[in-house]
Each structure stands twice: as structure tokens, then as C-alpha cells.
Image: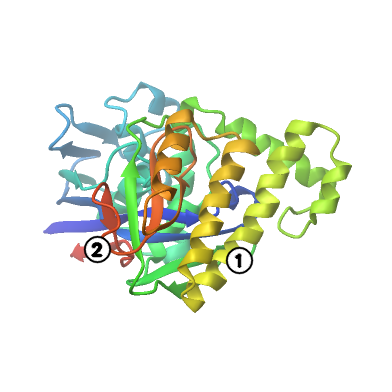
Amino acid sequence: MTVAAFAPGRVNLIGDHTDHTGGLAMPMAIQLGTTVTGETTGGDTIELRSGTQEEPAIVSIHVTTGELDGLSPSWARYVAGVVHELRPSAGFCGTVSTTLPIGGGLSSSAALELAVALALGFGGGALELAELCQRAEQIASGVPCGIMDQLASATGKPGHALLMNFTTMAVESVAIPERAAIVVIDSGQQRALADSAYGERRAACEQASMIVGALLHASVDDLYRIDDPVTRRRAHHVMTENIRVRDFAAAIRTGDLAAAGACMTASHRSLRDDFEVSTDVLDALVDRLVATDGVHGARLTGAGFGGCVVALTEPGALTEGWTVVPSGPARRLQA
């Protein structure tokens, strides 16, 4: 029996590097995504082929974490991570196709993970699916990533962004105004998260939390208790970013696109100056976009170090990039 599963990518409108600290973010699932199609076999291997890659991903259903580093092509590690966490009872042979730019900061890896998990028979709830695929990503990449990407793909809602609280794991749908256009522009600078300083940034946030408590509830005055200036800047970004997420959500609810855009641009400045995950290429792109008529605000999206920028605009203000729309969740298409 042929099985097909689709998982959307996501664009994060605001709230980066907050999920691993129990903070707030507001991503949305998008219409671009990854599809896995195939059939269960009587063997003990998962074999997936991609139209853009010559080499297939071949993974044993008994794969161990020690075997992941030796897998080729590189995307096979993400397949193996899912197989390791899901432990399917039978093999699978199929194909992978995607409309997402790889390494662009739109969660192509999370989309692959969720689509593979669903195709291989995962049958639990959205949060359980996101948690499984977060674990798969962590062992596949070696990066201690948060759960935002997987949770956004698992809980997407057409026409809505998703206000997430990573302390309670609550997800609230917020309608995107019809007159708002959301455009994603690739900076041309490929992001390599595993080679970045993501782990270092996370460690700094954990250190700050040990001093002032949960960053979601700490006040800016608490920053003076942090002696190390670098750790203080990292914490300042997270604390003020949580405030910006709340302000952005309130502006979207009332249709105040100018205020929402201002939150996005301020978020980029904080990611640039306090968290230091932007690049000259991203900064120049954001500056050019916010100087364009009809653009309310722009910021890097994703972990940084390259990838894409997201802009909130009037319809038709930009002729470059992809106009993305909030879409539904990861799902099986056939069974």
C-alpha cells in the first residue's frame, strides 16, 4: 500500500533563540514543505531517494547513534535520527521531494523529520510528534536545538500564526490580517547550524538562568546580577525578545502592521547586537528591505548565521523572494 506524508516548513515571524529557554515565539507553518511517498517492505532498511540527490539514504531500522556520523548523504542522518527514535517494525522504500530551500532557515530538516515519521507510521499527537523529531534532530546534527521548528510544523493552522509558550508548551492561534503579506528572501548565504556557535549561545542563556532564574519571568533590572558582559547581552536579547513577541502578537491581533513591523526590525537589531547571530549579508538585506516603501519590518529568521530574512509588507511591495501563507500541519496524505 502506497503511503504519502507531507510536513510544512515554517517561517518564524518573531522570537528566535527563545524556545530553549522556555520563552515565547510566533512562527507559522507555510505552504512550502517536504513530501515522503513510498511503501512498507518486508526488509529491515529504510531506503529513500531524492530527485535532487544522486545517492539514496539507506538506514537500518536497528540504527544506533554511533552509526549516524558515518551515514551518507548528509540528509540520511536526519532520516536515521527519526528511525532511531521511532523504531519502525518494518522497512520502507520511497522518495522524498521538497519545495523548501535547503539550509535557508525555513526548517527543511524538521519538515523532513516529520514527513518521515508520519510515513513510517507514527500515530501519536502533535506535541509527541514534535518531541520525537526534536530528539531526532539533536542526535542527527549534534546541535542542542529547541522544539519550535518541529512544533510549528506539527501544529500549523491555515490563516494563522502560532503564539508558542515553551514553558507550558501552549500553542495559541493568531489570525494573520488579510492585508498583510509575508515575504521570505534568501540572503544567498547558506546557513550551517552545526558549525555555528548555537551551542555556545544556548550555554550562555543557561548560565544566565542559573543566576537570575527563568528568563521569561526575569526583569531587565536582574541583568545587573550577571557579571559577565557577554552572558548579560545574551540574556538581554532573550528577555527583551519575549516582550517583543507579546507586543507583536498584540499588534497583529489589532491589525497594526506598522507596530508589528517595528517589533520585527527591533528583533533583528537585538539578534545582531546582543545575540550576535547575524551577518553583514543579513544586515544589509534587512536595511535595504526596511527602506522599501510598503515594507513594515524585516528580520533574520531562524537561528541566524546566514539563511533567510522575513519581511512583513503590504501586498505587492516586494517582487523578490517567496510570498508565504500560513498553512496547515504535517499530515499523512494517504494510508
- 205 above or below 199? below
Which label number is shown at residue 93? none
Say whether residue 318 is left or right of residue 4: right
The local crowd at label 2, few if under 14, some if 14 to 19, many if 20 or more residues have their Cα within 10 Å, is many
Q: Amino acid at mark 2?
A: Arg
> Can residue 88 be seen in this snapshot?
no
> Can residue 311 be seen in this snapshot?
yes
Image quadrant in which you'd find residue 271: top right
Q: Amino acid at mark 1?
A: Arg
Q: Observer-nearest residue: 303 or 119?
A: 303
Q: What colouring does the structure picture have?
A: rainbow
Residue visible at 20% across and 38% down in the picture: 47
The local crowd at label 1, few if under 14, some if 14 to 19, many if 20 or more residues have their Cα within 10 Å, is some
Say whether residue 59 is left or right of residue 196: left
Image position, residue 325 (x, y; %): 30, 63
Residue visible at 39% across and 28% down in the picture: 68
Image quadrant in which you'd find residue 228: top right
Indicate which disc, 2 or 1, sits on the residue closer to the N terminus. Answer: 1
Image position, residue 330 (x, y; %): 31, 61
Q: Which element carries disc 2, helix, strand or loop? A: strand
- 209 above or below 330? above
Say whether residue 154 is left or right of residue 260: left
Q: Observer-nearest residue: 280 or 159?
A: 280
Q: Observer-nearest residue: 52 or 278?
A: 278
Residue visible at 42% across and 31% down in the picture: 281
Q: For mark 2, what is the residue? A: 332
Image position, residue 105 (x, y; %): 39, 42
Q: Residue furthest right?
A: 225
Q: For mark 1, what is the residue? A: 246
Q: Which element carries disc 1, helix, strand or loop? A: helix
Question: Looking at the figure, which quarter contains the C terminus?
Answer: bottom left
Give the CA distance from mark 2 to mark 1.
Answer: 33 Å
